[in-house]
Amino acid sequence: MEAEELKALVISEVDAHSSQLSVLSSSIHAHPETCFKETKAAAWLGQYLTENGFSIEKGVCGLPTAFRASYGQGKPEIAILAEYDALPGLGHACGHNIIAACAVGAAVAVRPAIDRLGGEVIVIGTPAEETGGGKIIMANQGAFADVDIAMMVHPGVQNCAAIQALACQVLEVEFQGKAVHAATRPEAGINALEAMLQSFNAINSLRQHIRDKARIHGIITDGGQAANIVPDHSAATFIVRAEDDTYLDELKQKLINCFIGAATASGARLKYHWQGTPYAPMRNNLTLARLFQQNMESLGRKMGKTGSSDAAFSTDMGNVSQQVPSIHPMVAIAPEEISLHSPQFASAAASDEGSRAILDAAKALAMTAVDLLANPAKVAEVKAEFYRKDK
């Protein structure tokens, strides 16, 4: 059977499962679960895959809501990654319900190609993309060691086969001061909130002198207990982003210097903690991206130029892309004026356009898997790009 015949077959498979995929997406969207708490989503996805002939291992890498579901055996081993965590207070304002549904839909659809050509398709369920870095934990524990290709599709406001994702890390910071009555003896106190506000002012001044695509943004999580008490404690969470790991390290030190300066000026005691391993920048495999782009455009969805996205977000898929040839294309579900992480985007993730994106993305992923399964030279080309010395 020729590759084009297999592509027609996987397209029909996605269409045959469209109602089930819609139910999965809608159920996950209606029951948002935040990082490492995605019990319902993981269970629903696992059940669907099991019912369609996949062998599933739950709780992989010590993460209760992570899983690995496989069909077939041998090489190439093609992984399709599912995300399904939600944002606190905003639900699926990043559309991870769509990522999950199209991932399992693509994997189920590619079964006839596996039966015919051999190889293995794997769905890797990866929790906590938004804040916990689930893929980082899994990558560090060898979850992708045997994988030849890794793919996923993220909803957005444009269609593109490759993205720019920044390296980033989360900082937890706090100041300890001395509480006194704010009216009777303010001179005896040490104002931890003022130390935090001075830090914010220093960071605002720093922003003029950082690279264009670098980002520093944060919130105060504790600013005191009462207006008539000098705050003896303040806390904040910051995220630092940069185009590469080297500049991220430089920017992290500059950020800490802002807090050290405020501690020196105020007398408050500084404590800080960098969360986990940094999110790595996305390393797009353009050979693989071009295959995906061709398949998506064959479905009638015009894609932007490969690698042209100017988005400045971060994803733990970046860490996977440092270990395995990977793509993280975007599929539009909303107009460009709509921002991800907004209530409007959460609505779009449950819209008719969102449903159409699930089917298009699942088909394009499955078709790209067929390209790789049917043509070992393409797999070799993808890997050759990944292992080039000038990577």
Image (spheres, helix red, strand yellow):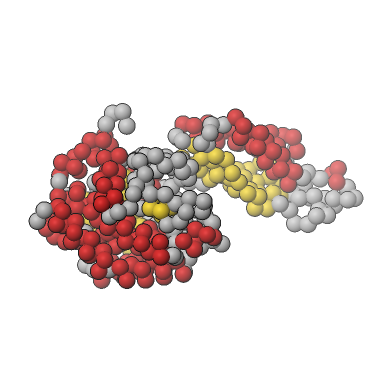
Q: Position of residue 24 (x, y in %)?
A: 37, 68
Q: Where is residue 221 in the image (x, y as percent from the top left)?
A: 65, 53
Q: Where is residue 100 in the image (x, y as percent from the top left)?
A: 36, 60
**Image quadrant in which you'd find residue 381:** top left
Residue nearest the viewer, comparing 384 with 146: 384
Is 251 above or below relative to 104?
A: above
For the point 59% across and 32% down, which residue is it? 254
**The N terminus - image quarter:** bottom left
- Visible residue check, residue 273: no
Q: Where is residue 69 in the image (x, y as percent from the top left)?
A: 27, 61
For the point 26% across and 47% down, which residue is it? 294
Q: Count every numbered label the image shows and give the total.
A: 0
For the point 47% across and 54% down, which residue is it? 335
Q: In this view, does 97 lie to the left or right of 181?
A: left
Q: In this view, does 367 lie to the left or right of 94?
A: left
Residue nearest the viewer, comparing 120 with 232: 120
Residue nearest the viewer, comparing 2 with 153: 2
- Looking at the image, the residue that sits furthest to the left is 1
**The C terminus - image quarter:** top left
For the point 30% across and 40% down, which residue is it? 285
Is 261 above or below relative to 15?
A: above
- Visible residue check, residue 107: yes
Q: Is residue 81 left or right of residue 221?
A: left
